[in-house]
Amino acid sequence: MLDRPIITLTTDFGLKDPFVGIMKGVILGINPKAKIIDISHNITPQNIFEAAHIISMGYKYFPPSTIHVIVVDPQVGSARRPLLISSQGHYFIGPDNGVFTLVYEEQHVEVIHITSPHYYFPPKGPTFHGRDIFAPAAAWFSKGIESSKFGNLINDYVTLPMPKSRISDETTVEGEVVYIDSFGNAITNITKDNLDKLSPEFSKNRFRVIYRDNQLSLSNYYSQTESSDLSGVLNSFGFLELFTYRGNASDKFDIKIGDKVTVKLI
């Protein structure tokens, strides 16, 4: 572990209530040396798919040994299991509800069902495992305690059926909108890797984005198009997103999660 271990928090708690602050207090009470970083607390309430995308986008930019705590947990208080996941130097703690599906897909993982009561508080009720289980487990783990002390390895962890882009023929990639950010940009699951497979000598001018039978240009950056039309751009995470310059594309064009998007090679 790092001399000053990093623990990140990703939740759907928002900032009105004291939940996030309480979790930080629990962590610091166990390990005052911990450095706590907020990734997001504005996940759409109970939206496990959205949380899966957020943590997948974010965790890679933290140093090895960072511990990522994710609490988006509609089944809190039920028989769903608390997990400690090790993935090539990155660690994750949260509920076994599929929120780590994209982490499982990206890297080899070891998944432990947290069962040792020494590393969490006796729950005072069924509604706040962020305080009673996930925060204390992360704090104890950040003190260098071996993961094997927390419970037993499992391989029947929950995964979600995440939508995948696909190359349907030598000129076409089919995908869909999987996330809408706070600017209203609609991020799809179509990647630059997909487009590179269609055309190894990549040039944005060779592609057309098709959404609801409309052909959209593929821009190099947002302000390249100053119109209020819908356009496409490859974002800094390597995903195709739909946007309108200085506007909210999702609101203006009524874009929804699951809407189909196609890219064709001209």
Image (cartoon, rainbow, N blue to C red):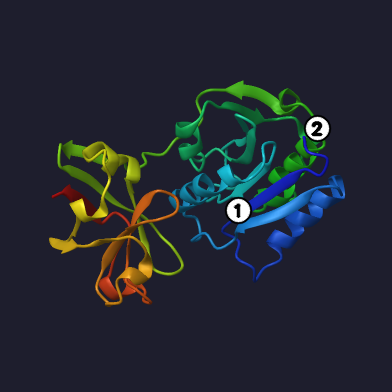
- Residue 194: give x, y in percent of width and height: 29, 41
- Tell me the residue that label 2 is attached to: 144
| SS label for mark 1 | strand
Does residue 137 appear left or right of residue 159 in this picture?
A: right
Does residue 171 appear left or right of residue 90 in this picture?
A: left
Q: Are marks 2 and 1 in contact (CB under 8 Å)?
A: no
**Relative to residue 159, is residue 234 depicted above or below?**
below
**Relative to residue 93, is residue 234 depicted above or below?**
below
> How packed is label 1: few (under 14 Cα within 10 Å), some, or many (20 or more)?
many
- Residue 54: give x, y in percent of width and height: 50, 51
- Quadrant for the N terminus, please: top right
Is there any visible trace of residue 39 in the rendered image? yes
Residue depicted at 67% across the width and 37% down the height: 64
Amino acid found under the numbered disc labelled 2: Gly
How many marks overall? 2
Is there any visible trace of residue 207 in the rendered image? no
